[in-house]
Amino acid sequence: MTEIPSPSLDALAAAVGRRVPDLMVEVREALAERVPDYAEFLAAHEEEVSAGVLGVLGRLVSLTNDGAINGAGEREFFESLGRSQWREGRDLPDLLAVYQIGVRVFWRHVAAAALEVGLAPGALAALAETVFFFVDQLSSASAHGFVLEQEEAGALRERHREELVDLMLSESTDPAAVRAAARRADWPVPEQVSVVLVEPDDASGRRALSRLDARSLPIRRPPLVGAVVPRRPRPAERAALTGLLRGAHATVGTAVAPEQLGRSLYFAEIAARLTKEHLLCDDPVFVADHLDAIIVHRDHRLLDALGDQVLAPLEESPPSSRARLRETLRSWLRHMGDRRAMAEELHVHPQTVRYRMGRLHELFGDSLDDPAVRARLMLALAWRE
């Protein structure tokens, strides 16, 4: 590249210096249309920026011989600009637009000044190449900084969100701790949340989780695969969640306060087990619709023990009639003794119902008149089979 003689450099710098006020006005007007925030910044810091323009010109001329940015300082500075752009919630294209607008106006004035001082065409071409290479490098450095900050911020946010989910799922937490962790995770705290669980090896379940909106938090606690979803008592919201999860064999826990998420998980795990055992078959399963089944089936041994205890009098009847008597007793409890309804359900004559009930009173005695006994019988008979 052509090295610019020192006298020409001095003359060029002086000529550009005289143009700086007009240059600043043009840049500010151009920025006002595209990125007004930067135009306001330029107006507030015009003196510092004007001094910087002259400093940049000197730096560009000194770089003409090698056409590259020597020294990490400039790269680091413009990379830090890109990082701050992300942290302040600004868009990268806006920053790059500032560079483009600035260099376009800057070069127009530099070129005019170069003609004034009679700068050789070869020197002007070399300077132009350096200017645009310089801006390209700085744009690249800012974009790199923006992406790095974005990735680091995203990784940090994900880590904070994992910590938030762990906190909400812990056995003992409080609302203040959840709110503090949510602030770190940049997660707006809803009034209520639910756990959504899918089968770890079910691809359709994982696809369904990926369709949940950005308010949802993933649960990464092997072997659990699921998400924490904000819940509101609105039919339309439940319908939307049902549509997203249909076909995914998902279980939706009860809606609870965020600090009680562990309770939603506890019930959801039981409901997921009952689904595997074909005791629940909705798609998806909403735990709130099956609390009775979960209460009864959370421990099969308890249900079996209750059935063995309260149905023990039936053991005194012959095996051939035991099933019919159990079926009649269940119908009697369900229809509150209405023999006509019982006969219709059992597809027998009312006289047959009367006979069977007589036999049951013989076996159970006066205990059938005890409301507590009837409640225990209903629990055992309604859920055991």
Image (cartoon, rainbow, N blue to C red):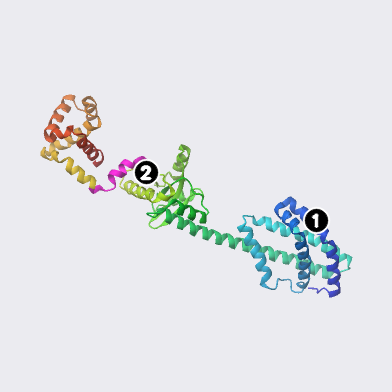
* Range shown magenta: 283-301
Picture layout, residue 189 above or below residue 348:
below
Quadrant holding the C terminus: top left
Residue 306 in magenta? Answer: no
Q: Quadrant of residue 342?
A: top left
Left/right placement of residue 371 relative to residue 201 reads left
Give the residue type at disc 1.
Val
Give the residue type at disc 2.
Val
The residue identified by callout 2 is 287
The foreground one among 131 and 291 is 291
Disc 1 and disc 2 in contact, CB within 8 angstroms: no
What x and y, as percent, mark residue 279? Answer: 30, 43
The residue identified by callout 1 is 25
Q: Which mark is residue 126?
A: none
Numbered disc 1: secondary structure: helix
The foreground one among 179 and 297 is 179
Residue 5 can be seen in this image: no
Tell me what residue is drawn at x 64 percent, y 64 percent.
80
